[in-house]
């Protein structure tokens, strides 16, 4: 090899090494999983998630609040918020390690907190109380500290099911645009939309109040990412209801209702969670009892196709999330103390090749934060 050839080969080799070292590192995420159990290993667990290979690796138990039911994450400011029977709690998230450090807590006035979310402007927390049938807002200071309660609304009414003798607010979530927040009430069979002021106060008079079929039990809802549709999960009957909504008027009219249970299934069931793929083409809903995930296509007019079904990979799928890459579904199976990781076919919507990650105790809620 002459000197010129050797020099050229060396340059090519060095360029190759440089290109390899300049390749961006694969995206990774912290995954926080809450559990609601009396054991000493319950609380908020932290995992590391790598979508490129579908690996979910446990990193540690960051909080030992044993009755944590739901979580919310402010990704812009690296704060996590949780609820349990004693109050609402805030944590800072270390950017490099993902470790949670307590900031402060506020005591609840409502009973049976079951859902927490963050307002669109990220200045307020919103909480639904199943036990007392209420919703409330709390302030968030710039450092993540939770300030005192700003507003609270108590629902009234009942419906026909044995679990509907009183109101049971189950979810409160901001609309994707505008100043409305939506609340599902399992006890009154209603979906309500309330205006929220710049000061974080909920208007006691809802802009819209939509009644489901008696006995349906609205639990959770999800907004379409691109079109003016929303989808409500009925816990008590295993249905999904589709509606059109408006940023100012709330729900305007119904579109469709489908069953998310197999036709042959007749045993006890409580439907639990609902999510859409990022492209808005597929709807997913979980069934506790049938232990399945129903998968339905979304038509351009907002209506739904008859569902196909995937096993949840465990027992009692209380919650699940579609990962930020939109290529995996992580299912929290509470009674089998496991998280099932499924590959998601982005063309067909189907869930395949499950892997099981055992958890210490009953997982309740899953949230992602980009590392």
Image (tube, grey):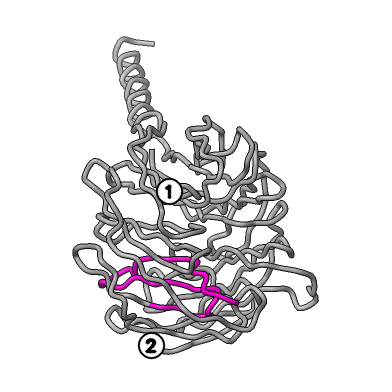
Q: Count the numbered circles shown.
A: 2
- Using the rendered view, name the quadrant where residue 308 is placed: bottom right
Q: Nearer the viewer, residue 57 or 85?
A: 85
Considering every residue shown, the one lying at the far left of the view is 198
Which disc is residue 252 wearing? 2
Q: Which residue is found at the position 52% from the left and 30% from the top?
A: 59
Which residue is the site of mark 1? Answer: 87
Identify the mark nearer the N-term, 1 or 2: 1
Q: Which residue is found at the position 76% from the left and 69% from the top?
A: 268
Which disc is residue 283 wearing? none
Secondary structure at numbered mark 1: strand
Q: Which residue is found at the position 58% from the left and 83% from the top?
A: 159
**88 magenta-colored:** no
Residue 181 % position (x, y): 34, 70
Name the quadrant of the C terminus: top left
Q: Nearer the viewer, mark 1 or mark 2?
A: 1
Which residue range is magenta in the image?
A: 165-192
């Amino acid at each position: 090899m002459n000197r010129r050839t050797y020099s050229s080969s060396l340059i090519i080799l060095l360029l190759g090494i440089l290109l390899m070292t300049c390749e961006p590192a694969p995206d990774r995420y912290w995954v926080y999983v809450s559990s609601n159990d009396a054991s000493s290993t319950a609380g908020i667990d932290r995992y590391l998630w790598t979508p490129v290979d579908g690996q979910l690796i446990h990193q540690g138990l960051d909080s030992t609040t044993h009755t944590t039911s739901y979580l919310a994450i402010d990704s812009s400011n690296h704060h996590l918020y949780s609820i349990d029977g004693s109050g609402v709690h805030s944590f800072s998230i270390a950017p490099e390690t993902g470790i949670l450090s307590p900031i402060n807590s506020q005591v609840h006035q409502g009973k049976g907190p079951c859902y927490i979310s963050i307002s669109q402007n990220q200045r307020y927390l919103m909480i639904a109380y199943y036990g007392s049938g209420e919703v409330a807002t709390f302030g968030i200071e710039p450092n993540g500290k939770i300030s005192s309660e700003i507003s609270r609304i108590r629902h009234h009414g009942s419906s026909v099911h044995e679990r509907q003798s009183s109101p049971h607010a189950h979810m409160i979530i901001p609309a994707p645009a505008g100043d409305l927040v939506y609340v599902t009430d399992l006890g009154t069979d209603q979906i309500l939309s309330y205006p929220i002021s710049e000061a974080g106060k909920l208007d006691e008079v809802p802009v819209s109040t939509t009644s489901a079929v008696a006995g349906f039990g609205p639990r959770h809802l999800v907004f379409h990412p691109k079109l003016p549709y929303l989808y409500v999960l009925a816990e008590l009957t295993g249905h999904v209801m589709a509606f059109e909504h408006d940023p100012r008027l709330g729900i305007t009219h119904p579109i469709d209702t489908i069953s998310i249970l197999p036709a042959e299934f007749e045993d006890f069931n409580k439907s639990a969670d609902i999510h859409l793929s990022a492209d808005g083409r597929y709807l997913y809903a979980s069934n506790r009892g049938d232990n399945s995930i129903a998968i339905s296509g979304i038509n351009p007019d907002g209506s739904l196709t008859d569902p196909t079904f995937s096993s949840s990979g465990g027992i009692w799928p209380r919650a699940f999330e579609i990962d930020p890459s939109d290529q995996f579904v992580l299912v929290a199976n509470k009674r089998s103390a496991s998280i099932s990781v499924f590959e998601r076919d982005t063309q067909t919507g189907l869930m395949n090749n499950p892997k099981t990650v055992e958890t210490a105790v009953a997982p309740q809620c899953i949230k992602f934060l980009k590392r």
